[in-house]
Image: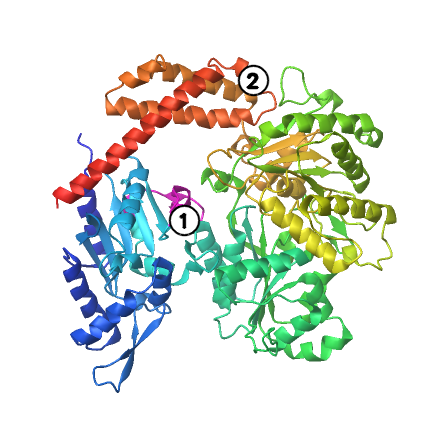
């Protein structure tokens, strides 16, 4: 049976689009593209344009780069008519009534740029090319279509009228696999996404993708509503399917009911973007008085404000204090320039919000909002919403709707009791509106698996990854806090840190059980360490220890006020000493003697950790939730963790970054095997633990050796690589060695790793690697040369 070729794939796609009510138009070059654009803009705007007027429109459209054009697309152009008296406003895209645009499909448009390029299938909306579909025949790698589009961007999109720079979404397909992504100057294949249904089932086959994603109203809705024009950096961000379904669920909930709800999206899946988009859309609802985004930590208040404003400049001002918050509620807030700010979207902490509705100073003003429809969106709704503040908010705002976001919901199994009893997420927020769990994210390659190693005297001698259950009960305080044990752990970390972090290409957090133990560790590192930059931060209140280690911890004013009655003076003195070390290391001037300075110290540690200027961050509770640093790949643990606290802490390490970061490394100096299995089972809907955890060291040794056997069958010696002439065999060598590199990167993360365990020597590996790099570069250059020749002479 013959493989379906590109031409057949293309024709079938166009016929399907016609059945979805796209008008098929035959446009062969830029001249015809411009003629069609003029006609469609006239129809859409119910106007007639002279050629001179249309040229002024084209001049307007031709300004700027991809990002500028995306803004132009969503705006209107004030056109002065030829009579020099009349001004009309031309709309390029109806972003509110997205189904009311004009939809066309064309194919094989040829544009002359640095080279002549011919594009597969183009979707035109009001005459502008907004969606480009690149097809490859079945059996070819999808990345070839991605690379083809990158060549178009370099060689022709920005030439002449540059209308193809208005593309908002690219679609790539080989018939069986289909992905989409937004248009940006710099592209990464990791930022291409499968579409999925509401239950997270990927829709990969082209005809099904076309039916659901390219349906006129849906693709237009994606462009109009679900692309974010992020301001820092200036890029287009299209939402992934689970983000789309979550926002849609919240919008429908608010529009059609007065009920609450929550979104369960695993840590690291982009909840900030999802919640921003939901908040932004809800602010356009006339019936909604305010949208209040509630965080439970002051650091997250400023962080979220910064992130929201990076998505949309000036969209929100943070609340420095309760007085500012009340002004924002009343609509009388002025920014630092003295300008009255529209405060329909507010970001604040739950503590300030609670103060605004309980403090007598503000009650009279706040009473006016008591019965208004206010939507509260709670970030990380598994944490401090389980207290009195939550109860007060619900009681005060009689017409409020509460929407929660969490990566680790509270169920009956992991609920903690307080004076209000054991409260689950569902009890407080109602129905779960959408779910995207850790196994979904790993499958979609949105987060990494965890590689968990247990180090200590309870480790079986024949395996680094199994626990001797007979000694599982060893957990006495005296044993865990002994100086001898702490020194041995420090020695272990100093010996293995380079291996874990790929020679400090990544960095780590070390979580310990108490401030007292942290001080012992810090001083042991200080005595023994020569090369690693180690920093620490902790609360100097008297209750910083991990009573339950469930991850419910907040950094806020109450932790660090100078006149706090529960200050532990010894802890504060120690922290002051450690901050002094930090000041010397980084030429800073922080202190605990001033609240603002302490917050600035926290922010500086956060910033330097993200920039890899800190090698090991030593903490008790801080930074184990809500802290996102893709450079972190290792968590050392010497404390008890369970359920959501465990998953939150582990998840600091599993952000996607690059090929070398193959997993999040978890090094446990306590027996957390059962706790890990229970937590993963709870938050992956009882799915197999092995979908979340990496395999054992022995597994990857065997896998590496099996790949080596395959490699030898292709190239029995290093020199024999040069004799491979057949391109298919060359590609097979490249794919096989690429797989070997990936497994080797995983192996290097294990403390047990030794080249002696492998069938291949390190020297052999490096020699084959040199051949691999040379051959890969040669094939890449030849393909580009051939592609350029084809485009130059064939068309």
Q: Residues within 10 Å of mark 2 (few under 14, many from 20)?
A: few
Q: Which mark is residue 487?
A: none
Q: Nearer the viewer, residue 329 or 161?
A: 161
- Determine if the magenta segment contains residue 773: no
Percent position (x, y) of residue 731? 30, 26
Percent position (x, y) of residue 194? 38, 45
In the rendered structure, which segment of residues is drawn in magenta? 186-209
Write down the residue under mark 2.
Answer: 754
- Position above or below: 783 against 774: below
Q: Nearer the viewer, residue 36 or 196?
A: 36
Q: Residues within 10 Å of mark 1 (few under 14, many from 20)?
A: few
Distance between mark 2 and mark 1 Cα atoms: 44 Å
- Determine if the magenta segment contains residue 201: yes
- Which residue is outermost to the left? 794
Helix, strand or loop for disc 1: loop
Eye-nearest disc, 2 or 1: 2
Percent position (x, y) of residue 99? 31, 65
Kindly check if marks 2 and 1 are in contact, taking CB atoms under 8 A apart as contact: no
Q: Nearer the viewer, residue 115 or 617?
A: 115
The quadrant holding residue 428 is bottom right
Left or right of 390, for residue 476: right
Q: Which mark is residue 197?
A: 1
Left or right of 297, for residue 221: left
Helix, strand or loop for disc 2: loop
Residue visible at 19% across and 55% down?
A: 106
């Amino acid at each position: 049976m013959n493989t379906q070729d590109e031409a057949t794939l293309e024709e079938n796609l166009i016929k399907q689009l016609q059945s979805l009510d796209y008008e098929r138009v035959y446009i062969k070059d830029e001249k015809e593209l411009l003629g069609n654009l003029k006609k469609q803009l006239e129809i859409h705007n119910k106007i007639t344009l002279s050629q001179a007027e249309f040229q002024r429109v084209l001049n307007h459209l031709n300004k700027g780069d991809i990002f500028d054009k995306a803004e132009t697309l969503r705006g209107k152009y004030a056109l002065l008519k030829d009579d020099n008296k009349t001004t009309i406003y031309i709309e390029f895209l109806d972003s509110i009534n997205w189904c009311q645009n004009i939809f066309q499909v064309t194919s094989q448009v040829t544009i002359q740029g640095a080279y002549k390029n011919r594009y597969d299938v183009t979707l035109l909306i009001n005459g502008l090319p907004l969606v480009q579909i690149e097809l490859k025949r079945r059996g070819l790698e999808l990345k070839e279509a991605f690379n083809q589009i990158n060549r178009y961007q370099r060689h022709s999109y920005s030439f002449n009228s540059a209308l193809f720079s208005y593309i908002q979404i690219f679609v790539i397909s080989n018939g069986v696999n289909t992905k989409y992504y937004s248009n940006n100057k710099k592209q990464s294949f990791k930022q291409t996404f499968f579409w999925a249904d509401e239950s997270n089932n990927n829709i990969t086959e082209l005809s099904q993708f076309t039916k659901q994603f390219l349906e006129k109203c849906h693709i237009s809705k994606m462009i109009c509503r679900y692309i974010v024009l992020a301001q820092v950096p200036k890029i287009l961000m299209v939402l992934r399917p689970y983000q789309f379904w979550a926002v849609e669920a919240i919008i429908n909930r608010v529009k059609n009911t007065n009920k609450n709800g929550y979104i369960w999206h695993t840590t690291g899946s982009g909840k900030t973007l999802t919640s921003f988009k939901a908040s932004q859309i809800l602010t356009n609802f006339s019936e909604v008085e305010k949208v209040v985004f509630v965080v439970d930590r002051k650091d997250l208040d400023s962080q979220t404000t910064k992130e929201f404003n990076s998505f949309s400049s000036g969209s929100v001002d943070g609340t420095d204090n309760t007085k500012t918050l009340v002004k924002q509620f009343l609509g009388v807030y002025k920014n630092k320039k003295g300008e009255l700010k529209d405060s329909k979207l507010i970001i604040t902490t739950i503590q300030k919000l609670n103060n605004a509705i309980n403090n007598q100073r503000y009650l009279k003003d706040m009473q006016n909002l008591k019965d208004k429809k206010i939507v509260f969106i709670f970030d990380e709704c598994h944490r401090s919403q389980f207290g009195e503040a939550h109860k007060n908010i619900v009681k005060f705002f009689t017409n409020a709707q509460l929407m929660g976001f969490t990566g680790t919901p509270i169920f009956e199994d992991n609920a903690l009791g307080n004076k209000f009893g054991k409260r689950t997420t569902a009890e407080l927020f109602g129905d779960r509106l959408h779910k995207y769990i850790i196994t979904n994210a790993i499958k979609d390659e949105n987060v990494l698996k965890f590689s968990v190693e247990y180090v200590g005297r309870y480790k079986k001698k024949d395996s680094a990854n199994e626990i001797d259950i007979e000694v599982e009960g060893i957990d006495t305080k005296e044993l865990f806090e002994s100086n001898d044990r702490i020194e041995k752990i420090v020695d272990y970390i100093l010996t293995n840190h380079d291996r874990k972090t790929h020679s400090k290409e990544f960095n780590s957090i070390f979580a310990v059980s108490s401030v007292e133990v942290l001080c012992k560790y810090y001083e042991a590192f200080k005595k023994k360490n020569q090369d690693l930059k180690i920093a620490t931060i902790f609360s100097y209140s008297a209750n910083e220890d991990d009573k339950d280690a469930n991850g419910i911890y907040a950094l806020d004013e109450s932790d660090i006020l100078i006149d706090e009655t529960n200050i532990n003076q010894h802890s504060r003195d120690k922290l002051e000493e450690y901050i002094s070390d930090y000041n010397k290391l980084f030429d800073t001037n922080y202190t605990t003697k001033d609240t603002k300075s302490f917050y600035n110290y926290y922010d500086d540690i956060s910033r330097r950790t993200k920039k890899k200027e800190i090698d090991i961050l030593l903490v008790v509770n801080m930074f184990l939730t809500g802290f996102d640093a893709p450079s972190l790949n290792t968590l050392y643990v010497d404390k008890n963790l369970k359920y959501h606290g465990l998953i939150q802490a582990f998840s600091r390490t599993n952000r996607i970054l690059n090929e070398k970061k193959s997993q999040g490394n978890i090094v446990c100096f306590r027996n957390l095997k059962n706790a890990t299995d229970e937590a993963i089972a709870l938050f992956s809907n009882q799915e197999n633990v092995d979908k979340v955890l990496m395999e054992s060291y022995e597994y990857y040794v065997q896998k590496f050796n099996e790949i080596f056997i395959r490699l030898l069958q292709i190239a029995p010696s290093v020199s024999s690589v040069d004799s491979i002439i057949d391109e298919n065999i060359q590609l097979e060598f490249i794919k096989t060695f690429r797989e070997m590199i990936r497994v080797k990167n995983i192996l290097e993360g294990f403390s047990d790793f030794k080249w002696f365990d492998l069938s291949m020597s390190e020297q052999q590996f490096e020699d084959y690697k040199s051949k691999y790099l040379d051959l890969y570069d040669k094939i890449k250059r030849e393909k580009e040369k051939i592609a350029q020749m084809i485009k130059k002479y064939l068309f």
